[in-house]
Amino acid sequence: MEQLGAAALPVILGVILVFGFFKDVDVFDSFVQGAKEGVSATLHLMPTLIGLILAVSMIRASGLLEMLCHLAGPLARAAGVDPELLPLALLRPVSGSGSSAYALDLLRQFGPDSETGKIASVLSSSTETTFYAITVYFGACGCKKLSYSVPAGLLGDAAALAFSILSVKVFG
Amino acid sequence: MINYIWFGMILASALCALCTGRLGELSTAVMDGAQGAVELSISLLGSMCAWLGVLKIAEKSGLTALLAEGFSPLINWLFPEYRDDQQIKGKMCMNISANFLGLGNAATPLGLAAMEAMQAQNPHKETPTRGMVLFVVINTASLQLLPVNMAAMRSACGSAQPFNILPEIWLTSLAALGAAVAFCKLAESRSRLG
């Protein structure tokens, strides 16, 4: 299974290249042309990223998440889950690397095949980093209004939290 | 909107750091965060260029149009406003396929290309179209065939069966995606009435 995942990228690259080559596309020229667009897109994105990541790292350093987890601890116990899972649920929409690190810590502490370890695994691989995606995607094309994307994304994260607990409790 | 969110995040963390006496950590976090963002941009630069280069080849050879044709029923239902735009549909399909195959590094550049194509046709540049919002929301959820990173983490921690949580992951990501898409569709129909 893991080899299948590792093979996906080379296979896709190969298919695209071979298909293009036999369709008489100037593969190298096209590649360079696309890569040029990549440079301007990334540079365009950098100020937005700096602003967002700065705010996220401030939130992490300020202890706000710990405070929220402390407040929500009794709620978690009432739902029959370990309160240690809460920081993961709060980190997941905000920071991809932060939530991965925290999930790894939970797997080490509780064991990957324990109930808490399984919920942590399911929760952290069932959604993307909501705020990162919203800022990067809208930032890149210069949309200042976010419309209803934030509530929609957070609703998805809440559903992921509920279903990760439910599915592990039912199947696991 | 992003104004309020950003301001709220910074204000909340400043107040919180004041209460918990972590002002020192907070000031290092400002600098570390800015530096981290630049490092991320640099590492993103390589994969952006590589994948947008490959996307260009796929577009010129007609492969993305072929892919768009295959996914057409689904894409037409989700994004009726882009029903007749093969170019946008092709870019969306590349992004969704990359996400599905777990190629996160490829999915972002391809998704940004789709967003820029939609923005080019958007009459109100500051307000995203319904399709743009839905596309971003789909990208905040994730539907992955094989979450290899998680499996690697689990086996590194000594899991007997790193992949035995696959059904739970599929069910949970489908539920999250369904909830987010349903919310968007509801919000779309309300904004159409209002």
Image: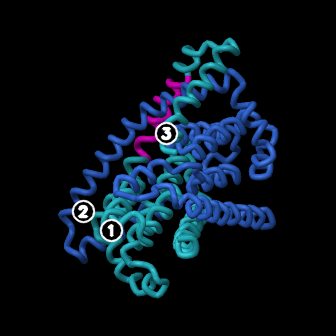
Chain colours: A cyan, B blue
Q: CA distance from mark 2 to mark 3?
A: 42 Å
Amino acid residing under circle 1? Ser
- Mark before the other along the chain sequence, 1 or 2: 1
The residue under label 3 is A3
- Residue B187 x, y percent position in the rendering: 71, 65
* Residue at 57% in and 30% down: A11
Q: Which residues are magenta?
A: A34-48
- In whole angstroms, how far apart are the C-alphas of marks 1 and 2? 8 Å
Residue ID for mark 2: B26
* Above or below for B170 versus A164: above
Instruction: Nearest to the eye among marks 3 and 1: give it.
Output: 3
Chain letter for the residue marked with disc 2 in the picture: B
Q: Is residue A68 left or right of residue A152?
A: left
Q: Amino acid at mark 2?
A: Leu
Residue B4 versus residue B167: which sits nearer the camera? Answer: B167
Q: What is the CA distance from the residue labelled 3 to the residue labelled 1?
A: 43 Å
- At 41% from the left and 87% from the top, the residue drawn is A74
Image marks 3 and 1: residues in contact by CB distance under 8 Å: no
Residue A23, given in percent of the width and then of the height, sits at 70, 15
Contact (Cβ within 8 Å) of mark 2 with mark 3: no
Q: Are marks 3 and 1 on the same chain?
A: no
Tell whether label 2 touches label 1 (CB within 8 Å): yes
Residue A85 image position (x, y, % from top left): 40, 72
Q: What type is the residue that disc 3 sits on? A: Gln
**Looking at the picture, how far across and down is residue B174, in whole percent?**
64, 60
The secondary structure making up most of the magenta span is: helix
Where residue B13 is drawn, which disc sits there? 1
Chain to which mark 3 belongs: A
